[in-house]
Image (cartoon, rainbow, N blue to C red):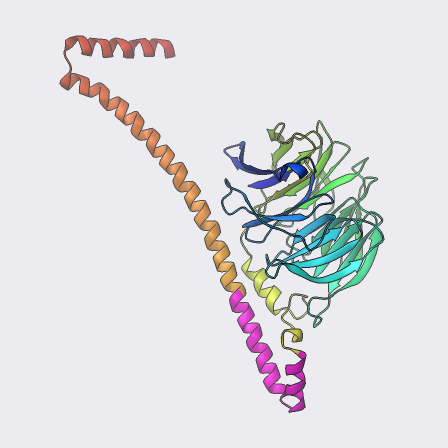
Amino acid sequence: MFASSGTVLKIQAIDQNQIETLSTFGLPKLTRQLKIAQISWCYDNSYIAMVQEGSHPHIVNVKDKQNISLVHTIQALRNVTALTFKNNTKRYIALGTQYGEVHVYDTKSRSLQKKIDKFDSAIRILEFSLRDDMLAIATENALFVYIEQIGSNGEFVREMMLPACSAVRFHPSLNEILAFGTSDGHVTIKDMAKDEETVVGQRHTDKVTGIAFTPDKKVMVTAGSDKKICIFDFISKECLFRMNIHNGATSLDISWDNQMMAIGLEDGTVYVYNIRDPLKPLICPNSHNGPVHKVAFERGPVDVEQVRHNTLDKNSGTTLNDSEISECQVEQIFSRGDGEKYQDALEARMEEKLRKEMLRMVKSHMVYLERKLMEHCAKFQEFMDSEFSSLHTAMARWDIFNLGDLPQIAQVIDSADVKSSVRK
């Protein structure tokens, strides 16, 4: 299942090699013709944050994929041009504005939590790393990477500045891997931990508009305005396959199960491919009346190992840190020389946070499994109804021999003969 945006938001499902639009969500008439520039699923797929370029962001409820509803309009910031949920919580959203400001918004208190920085041009792309400890900020003039400092209570500090880019994506399974594409067709993969860059051979002749990775760490896909899609081996960085499409691509995403990729085009079409068989696309023509600005697959179940790593890794920006115990408490503890009590309290809070994260993970898995079970039950019920209908029809023919008279029997036999001859 994936979402796509043009001037409306659509939730679309892939079923038996067909694309079905489950629901369409439009905004009020005054803003109906503005493009929805950015959309972002929260970690458990219950909400989508979206923004029409230069407008107020909106949060919509998508728990029922066939009945989308508006939950909240973020009034705290105007002229928002980019947004993204954090990957491991639905409480915080990063927001970027036309004026170059980047803020973190708290959906629980419905207020701006902190300002990350101010830039000299509009924000175009915001992207959190897998563990949420890095934030890539693409402006019109450059790409900046910020890293959350341990013990700073969520403060992000600028780590590096890179050239201007047109597409940005962190790897969904490798926290330190960042890829970005440029307006002249180049794609670069940067290992943030080793500070190493690999420039992928130029396979695009125009702006790179989409980059995506398979979570299994095997494949990278790029799309561009030059009407080309390139599939790379992630390890060797060699291009395995390149194909042309009928129009320029505007957005690209890959499903969490490594199976499908969706590509939005300038003419409103959405292509969906099986990555292992890209020559046979599923086409959703005229999905939108104008360009498809964003396509995004729903997120997969929470990874148990990733939750454990996020919570306990001392080098991670999402680690429970000293700031979660107030400065006043820290001063009181150390003034009494109770360093051991402080450490015990810190470890207890870490254990509590791990417990909550594990419960969240279990809940996420249960919700996902429940949804899949309901889908399979619905398909099974449809199959059984069809089978019982066929049996009922067959039994009706036998009943005519028990209850009918000779003319009725002859009529049934003649009717069956006519159908048989037609099939032949």
- Quadrant of the rendering where the C terminus is positioned: top left
Residue in the picture at 61% in, 86% down: 340
Furthest toward the front, the residue is 30
Q: Is residue 161 above or below residue 3?
A: below
Instruction: Give the number of callouts.
Output: 0
Query: Which residue is painted at 46% across and 47% down in the image?
Result: 371
Q: Is residue 150 above or below residue 71?
A: below
Out of 351 and 140, give the one closest to the viewer.
140
Depicted 344 relative to depicted 59: above or below? below
| Image quadrant where residue 12 sits | top right
The majority secondary structure of the magenta stretch comes to helix
Span colored in magenta:
327-356
Q: Position of residue 53 (x, y in %)?
A: 72, 43
Estimate the x, y position of residue 395 in percent, counting from the top left.
23, 23
| x and y, in percent, of residue 41 in the image | 60, 49
Q: Residue at x 49, y 63 (%)?
A: 359
Determine if the magenta segment contains residue 348. Answer: yes
Near-viewer residue (49 or 264): 49
Q: Is residue 154 visible?
A: yes
Mark yes or no: residue 193 visible.
Answer: no
The answer to whether 152 appears left or right of 367 in the picture is right
Between 25 and 318, the one lying in front of the other is: 25
> Could you say where residue 228 lies in the image, as x and y percent from the top left?
74, 33
Q: Is residue 180 magenta?
A: no
Of the 4 image quadrants, the one containing the N terminus is top right
